[in-house]
Image (cartoon, rainbow, N blue to C red):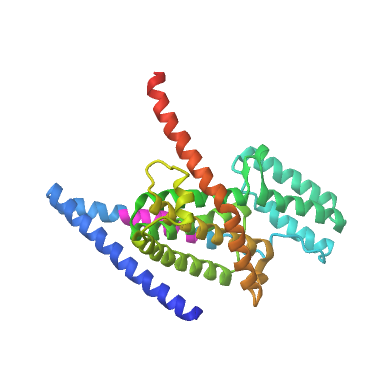
Amino acid sequence: MKRNLMLIAGVFLAVLAILLMGNVITVGEKLGEIFNTVYAEYVFYVLILLLAVIFVVGPVIRVHSAPEFPALNVDGEADASELLKFGRKLAANCMYIEDEEKRKEHQTELGRELQLYSADAPQLRQLLDREVMLRFNGDPSLGVKGIDSKMKEWAKSVFLITALSQNSLIDSAVVMVMNYRQIEDLVLATGFRPSRSQMFRLYAKILTTALISYCTSEIVSDLAGETSLTGALSALKIPGVVTESAVQGAVNALLTLRIGYVAQTCLREGPDALAGRRRRDVSLQAFRAAFASIPSVLAGTASAVGKGLAGLVRRPSEE
């Protein structure tokens, strides 16, 4: 079943790539006709290639350049030497703190405490647990956003863009690109990446999610009447977003959160996170967490858009 699903997803990706390339070529030819020069067409193709490198190839390269780490947690059975080695790896990867001065101060303090408790396993365990939680939960004083906050921001972006696009192919492309970038963001936030096999599974989930996004867009556009979901979404009253598109955006946001929670588990638990039966449990837990988070994502998106439009309306009158 899973092999068949991957085959279908692979075929879908190939078809999507062909359709996108066809649209790019069509637009390029029209630009050449409008400007009456073939160079306009070539400039457009180069621009599209650069965007693909920046938003697709770049994130993949940056993710795989990050060091693989067995787990971002503190093993209760590890001795002091293993914990110290773990701590030094954490101290060497503090890029999640964007402010350079604060990052250096934090690294210096973490290094000092590691040296102080180098032979004390219980104290090291507490210190490292605190550092790990900082990366997952964030700290406003250091300007660090937690992973949960980052995932919800990506889900909001996916919801808003795919709800506004009202185009199945664009929805699928957006879902793929933004989920690739979400994985990059989470890896940079922790300083490490999941194992190669886990990365492959995450990429497979992204591909499957793009397929689901396309199918959902096609199905929802053909549905008539109002379900309880469409009624709830219409109550949000997001400017510029019709109810059917809001349903599509909500499904895409839900699937984006699911991928984020699976990636988070891989970073917490290491190589064994998706091994054997544990893989099914992780997938189920990710769906539950995504369903629990989606109401706040949708409400937060509606609030942010409303405030933004209100600000645009007020500014001219204030001047």
User: Residue 144: x and y, percent?
Assistant: 63, 43
Can residue 67 be seen here? The reply is no
Q: Residue at x 72, y 60 (%)?
A: 73
Q: Relative to the observer, which residue lies in front, 283 or 107?
A: 283
Percent of width and height locating residue 230: 44, 53
**Relative to 227, residue 280 above or below:** below
Q: Quadrant of the C terminus?
A: top left
In the visual, does 306 lie left or right of 66? Answer: left
Instruction: Evaluate whether residue 238 shows in this view.
Output: yes
Toward the viewer: 72 or 38? 72
State whether residue 71 is above or below residue 297.
below
Q: Is residue 230 above or below residue 139?
A: below
Q: Residue at x 36, y 53 (%)?
A: 51
In the displayed image of the protein, which residue is found farthest to the front? 225
Q: Nearer the viewer, residue 134 or 103?
A: 134
Residue 114, x across and y down, in percent = 79, 51
Q: Position of 114 compared to 70: left or right?
A: right
State yes or no: residue 107 in magenta. no
Tell me the magenta residue range: 48-61
Count of marks overlaid on the render: 0
User: Predominant secondary structure in magenta?
Assistant: helix
Q: Position of residue 171 (x, y in %)?
A: 38, 57
Task: Please state if 208 lies on the left or on the right of 47 as rendered.
Answer: right
51 in the magenta segment: yes
Residue 139 is left or right of residue 52, and the answer is: right
- Location of residue 67 (image quadrant): bottom right
